[in-house]
Amino acid sequence: MAVTNIQGIRSSRLDLIKVVNGDLPADTVIEDGTVVNVLTREKLNHDVVVKGNRIAYVGPDGRQFAGEETQAVDASGTYLAPGFIDAHLHIESSMLSPTRFARLVAGRGITTIFFDPHEIANVAGLEGVRWMTEEMEGTPVNGFLTVPSCIPASSEELETTGAEFGLCQIKEALKWDSAAALGEMMNFPGVINLDEETIDKLAATADLGLPIEGHASGLSGPQLDAYIASGVGSDHECVSKGEAVERARKGLWTYIREGSGWADLVNVVKAITEEGLSVDRFCLVTDDRDPHDLLEVGGVDNSIRLAIREGLDPVEAIKMATVNPATRYRLDDELGSIAPGRRADINLISDLEELTVEETYLGGRPVGEIDWPETKGSSLENTVNIGEITGDTLEPDESARYGLVAHADDIITEKLDLSDADANKDELDKLAVIERHKGTGNIGTCYVDGFNLGGGAFASTVAHDSHNLIVVGENVEDMAKAANHLAEVGGGQTAVKDGEVLATVELPIGGLMSSNDPESIASSVRDVKEAIGKLGCNIDQPLMILSSLALAVIPEVRLTDKGLVDVNEQRVI
C-alpha cells in the first residue's frame, strides 16, 4: 500500500524493531551497494535491510538479519538512492489516468508525487478531485493531494466553468487522508489585497497545520514579501537566477521547474552553481509533462539528470528530488532518504552522473513484480456538451474592433487592432471557444494572428483553465467538423482539413485524460502534431499555445466562451 497518510503505521514499525532485535527475519537484504545518503551528503558502503514496506537497518553486514526466506539482492557496482519525489505536478497534463501515470513514472524511479488536480476540478469539481485522489490511493506510488485553490481562475462574468471548487469544497478536501497542502495559490492579487475569500482559504489550511503552495509569477520586492507573509511557503514560477535567489533568501521553498512547456532549470539552477546558494531550500519539479516527453526523457528523473549536467554534484541534485520535497511537506520521517523507519523506496543506479536506474523498489517490492491496478470507471466521461455546431456560429463578428495575436514561443498574447490598415482579415485565422460543460450555447469568437494556417482547423478540449472546447482554423466549416468530432469521441485533440479528420487523440475522461497505455496516447499526440504541421502551422508546440489562449488570467487578451477578454482590465471587450 502506498503512503498517502501517516495513520495506522504502528504495527509495521514494531516489526522493524523486531528485525533488528533478531526476533523476526528481514524480507530483503540489499547487499554491497553504495548508499547515497542525502541526509549527510555522503556515499557509504552499506547494506539495506527491508521488512514489509519499510527500512529496518542501514549499515555493514546486513546479512545478520536474514532468515531462510529472506531475499538477498546483490547491489555491487550500483548506488542505492532514495526513490525520486516530484514536489509539484498536474497528472492531467500527461493525458494519462492516475493509474497509468503512476505505473509510467514508477518505471523511471519516481516513487512519490504531490499532485494538484486543478484541471479536473475545473471540469468536475469535488467529484473529479475525489476520483483522481482515489485512483492514486489505489496505486503503489505515494500520491499526495495538494488541494486546488483557485477554481475558477477568473470570474463567472468572464467565462463559464464546469464546476465550482470554492472554500466549502477546499475545506472538505483538506481533511482527506492524502491531503498534504493547499495547492498553488495563483490568485496572488487576492492575497496581497486581502480578498476575504482568499484569506479564508489560507486560514483554513493553516488551521489544519498544512503547508500552502505558491504561484508567484513575476512577483518581487515588497509584493513578494507580502505574499510570503501570508503563509505561502513555495513557488515554482521563477524563471531566472535572480528570482530564485530572492525567493530562497526570503524563505520560500524554491521549486526549479523543467516541464514540457516550461524549461526553467538551466537559468534557475545558476542560483546554486553561480551564486553558491545551498541546495537545502530547493526542489526539482516538472509541473506539466506531456506523454511523449514522459516516455522519451522522463519526469523529475530527467530534471535531476539535467541539473547534474549543469554542474550540480549528483548527490546534491538527488537531494533536491528526494529528502528536500519530503522535508518541505513535513514527511521526511516517512520518505525521501534511505534510513531506518523510512519507506523502502529505493533506486539502484549504475551510473550516478547519467542517473541510469537499473531497478526500483517501491515499498520494498521491485516495480517489475507489482500487479498494477486498472483505471476504474467514472462519471467523468461524456463531458463535451455542445450540441451540433455549424460553421456560421463560429464566424467572428465583423464589427469587432479587436482580435488576438498569439506567439510561437510564448503564452503572452497581444491585442490585435482590426481597424489598423495592416490588419487584413482575409489573412487571419479564426478562433472560437465553445462552452462544453453546461450546454449554455455560449461561443466566443475572434480573429487570430500567429498560426498562419494554409487550410483546415485543429481543436482541443484541453484549454486552460476552464477547459471549454477551443478551435482555430482557416475556415469555419473545418472548425465545426473538428468541434463536432471531439464531441463524438468525448473530448481530446484533433486536426481536420477539407471536412476530413486527419488525426485525433481521444481523451474521454473529463476531456483531459485517457485510460489507454502511454505509448498509444503519445503516438496519437504525435500524429495530431504532424497533421497540424501539414496545415501550415510552424509553431513547435501548437496545441500548448492553443490551449493557453483561453486562460483569462495571463495578459494581454484571451478568448473565452463569453468573448474576447482584456486581462489587465478583467472585462469582456
Image (spheres, rainbow, N blue to C red):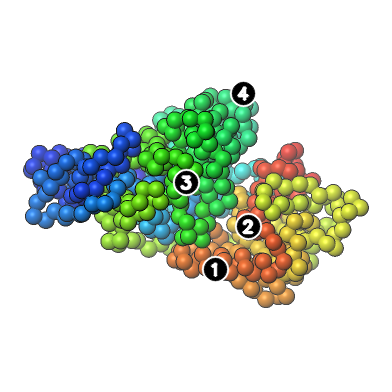
Q: Position of residue 307 (x, y in %)?
A: 47, 44
Q: Earlier in the sequence, mark 2 or mark 3?
A: 3
Q: Which residue is mark 2?
A: 541
- The 10 Å Cα crowd at callout 1, few under 14, some 14 to 19, many 20 or more, is some
Q: Which residue is mark 3?
A: 309
- The 10 Å Cα crowd at callout 2, few under 14, some 14 to 19, many 20 or more, is some
Give SS at disc 1: helix
State yes or no: discs 1 and 3 in contact (Cβ < 8 Å).
no
- Pick the front one: 389 or 515: 515
Give SS at disc 3: helix
State yes or no: discs 4 and 1 in contact (Cβ < 8 Å).
no
Residue 391 has which mark? none
Q: Quadrant of residue 482?
A: bottom right
- Per the model, the C-alpha gap separating discs 4 and 3 is 35 Å
| Left or right relative to 567: residue 273 | left
**Kind of residue sitting beneath label 3:** Arg
